[in-house]
Image (cartoon, rainbow, N blue to C red):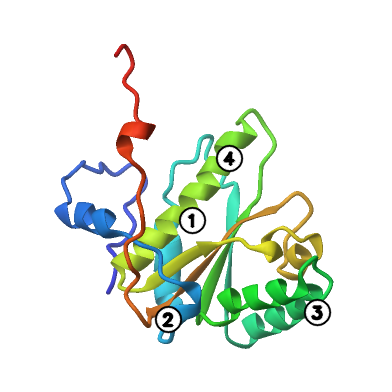
Amino acid sequence: MTIPPAPAFGAPLPVAASPDTLALLSQRRSSSAQLLEGPGPDAAQVHALIQLAARVPDHGKLNPWRFVVMAGEAKAALVEKLRALAKIQANPTKAEAALAKLSVPPVSVLVVFSPKPGSIPLWEQELSAGAVCMTLLVAAEAMGFGANWITDWYGYDPDARTAAGLAEGEQVAGFIHLGTAVEAPLERARPDLAQVITYLGA
């Protein structure tokens, strides 16, 4: 599956209805990371997914995020570094088990929140990084892959972040795990919209 080429700068982009997008969103469900096997997206497909994710709203055009693609031997080497760090976590057994979410999927994309100085509020930059993660999930499913957005302990441990190549001041927005879902994910409980919607003036 290919995506259309990126539009030229300044090209008009008409708003058009997309029933297929609505259908996808109506049934979107994260796949279990431990149930993602090969084949995962190839290099060209990962590049296309990132191209789509980079189109999210971004106040100030700061690009307060970047991507680290993890696969193959390099990913396995990172997991081994994290195994050593798992032994010194508060619950080593649980920390070790959590690494399966990273080691099993054939491809993972680490979305790094990399805030930029200036007048744009930090919160808005964080929201943009979150939008990147969500867009990656939706785009991956539209491409036919299972996907899961996870942080876990290695997204917060300072030594783990360093092992993943994060610089001072950067944070993990999410590990987006990609692959072929062994099992179709099951629908989960959803919020009662009456409890989360209010109407101004009502």
Looking at the rendered structure, the secondary structure element under dot 1 is helix
In x, y percent, where is residue 181?
A: 37, 78
Task: Examine the image and state in which quarter residue 15 appears.
Answer: top left
For disc 2, the marked residue is 40
Q: In the rendered structure, which disc, 4 or 3, sits on the residue that comes first in sequence?
A: 3
Q: In the rendered structure, which disc, 1 or 2, sits on the residue that comes first in sequence?
A: 2
Label 4, label 1: how far apart the Cα atoms are: 13 Å
Looking at the rendered structure, the secondary structure element under dot 4 is helix
Amino acid residing under circle 1: Cys
Amino acid residing under circle 3: Ala
Task: Examine the image and state in which quarter residue 90 appears.
Answer: bottom right
For disc 1, the marked residue is 133
Label 1 Cα crowd, 10 Å radius (few <14 / some 14-19 / many 20+): many
For disc 4, the marked residue is 125
Q: Are marks 3 and 1 in contact (CB under 8 Å)?
A: no
Q: In the rendered structure, which disc, 3 or 1, sits on the residue that comes first in sequence?
A: 3
Determine whether, in the image, residue 91 is placed left or right of residue 32.
right
For disc 3, the marked residue is 84
Label 4, label 3: how far apart the Cα atoms are: 33 Å
